[in-house]
Structure formats: structure tokens, C-alpha cells
Amino acid sequence: MKGRTSVWCNTFLTHWRPIRQPLSRLESNQDSAVFLQFSVFLGIIFFLELTAGVLAFVFKDWIKDQLKFFINNNIRAYRDDIDLQNLIDFTQDYWECCGAFGPEDWNLNIYFNCTDTNLSREKCGVPFSCCTKDPAEDVINTQCGYDIRAKGDNEQKMFIYTKGCVPQFEKWLQENLTVVAGIFIGIALLQIFGICLAQNLLSDIEAVRESCLFT
């Protein structure tokens, strides 16, 4: 029995790359530490994700306010940064929305507000990304939002999106809750599998180390 154990140890040590060299207590301890650190790292990430999910559910109103604050700050700087401008246009076009909670949020921008001191041609307007799409038009009309907020609500609905991006995002989450939950559950299961695998490898290394040291 002792001879069989020695043969098995030699075969294991020969074919396992991390401990291909003659096994010593220091080397096996290093291998064990690597798997232990890996499992602890995955555990910490999993715990942080779980905590973030719980906090997001508990403080959803606070998160909504922060999202509104973030979007409104970006609206103020719409013409100051071309990358930010493209991001806002993409968001409004994709979600079919305008502003954080509606077109009136564009009063925060110095070029689109309706104040008497505003001399911009875009006064009382919205960016073209707020405009509803006409399938018959091949070229985007970048002036479609000019003066639109000076008109009545019913007329605005004919030309621009009147729903805000925050409500539209909430609506998308509700409609795709199963998909979103499935993605997060899948990621969590992969992390749990990684933790279990690392712990099993750690146990195997310890078992082989003890077996080889005492044969």
C-alpha cells in the first residue's frame, strides 16, 4: 500500500505544473496560499455585489434622485463636451426620452432655456435626439427641436418625446426584469463555482502534501 501511494504521489507531482519540481513544504504552502487568496477574492466580490443589490433595493428613491442629478448636470454641460453631447443624444434616442423627467429639464442649459436673456437660436428648444423619428426621412433634421417647448403640450407630443429618461429606464428594467435577474444570478453562480473549485483544489493539495510527506 505504501508503494502504491509513493507511485501515485510521483505521478501527481510530475504532471501537475504548479508543483512539478520536487515538493517541499514551502512550495505547497505557496500553492495553497494562491488558491486561498483566489477564493477569498471571489468571496469579497460576491459579498460586495450582494450588498450593492440590497442597498439598491432599499435606497431606490435615493438612487433615482442621484440619477436625476447626474443627468441634469450633464444637460447643463451639453454643448461644452462633444463626447458628453454624443452620449446624451445616444441615450435620448435609444430610450426615446427627453431630459431626466421631461423636456422642461432642458431649461437648465443656457442655450435651450426660455429666459428673455437667452439670445440663442435654440431658445425654448430641445436637442434633435428628443425628436420623434419619421421613417420617411433619410436625413436627420438637427433643427427639429427648435422652439418646440414654446408650443402646447399636445403639439409637443407630435414632434418630440415627452417622457423623461429616468422613467423610461425604470420601465425598461420592469419589462426586462427576468433577463436582468438571470444575468446577475448567472454571474453569482459562476463566482460561487469558482470559490468551490478553489477550495476543492486547496483541499487536494493539502491531502497530497500530507500523503507525500509521510510516505
Image: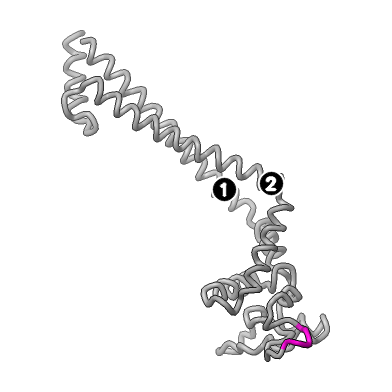
Q: What distance separates the C-alpha of mark 1 from that of mark 2?
A: 17 Å
> Which of pointers 1 and 2 lies earlier in the amino acid sequence?
2
Q: What residue lies at 61% left-to-right and 74% top-to-bottom?
A: 77
SS type, badge 1 = helix
Q: What residue lies at 69% left-to-right and 46% top-to-bottom?
A: 57
Against 98, is 13 above or below? Answer: above
- Which span is picked out in magenta? 114-118
Q: Residue furthest top?
A: 1
Quadrant showing the N terminus = top left
- Which residue was labeled with disc 2? 57
In this rendered view, identify the residue nearer to me: 168 or 89.
Answer: 89
Label disc, if present, on residue 182 of the rendered structure? 1
* Amino acid identity at mark 2: Phe
Q: Is residue 117 magenta?
A: yes
Residue neighbourhood size for the residue with mark 1, other residues' Cα within 10 Å, grouped as few (<14), some (14–19), many (≥20):
few
In this rendered view, identify the residue nearer to me: 37 or 212.
Answer: 37
Quadrant showing the C terminus = top left
Residue neighbourhood size for the residue with mark 2, other residues' Cα within 10 Å, grouped as few (<14), some (14–19), many (≥20):
few
Q: Is residue 100 magenta?
A: no
Answer with the quarter of the image where residue 24 lies: top left
Against 179, is 102 above or below? Answer: below
Instruction: Tell me residue 59's x, y (percent).
Output: 71, 48
Answer with the quarter of the image where residue 96 lies: bottom right
SS type, badge 2 = helix
Instruction: Tell me residue 134's x, y (percent).
Output: 64, 85
Q: What residue lies at 28% left-to-right and 15% top-to-bottom?
A: 210
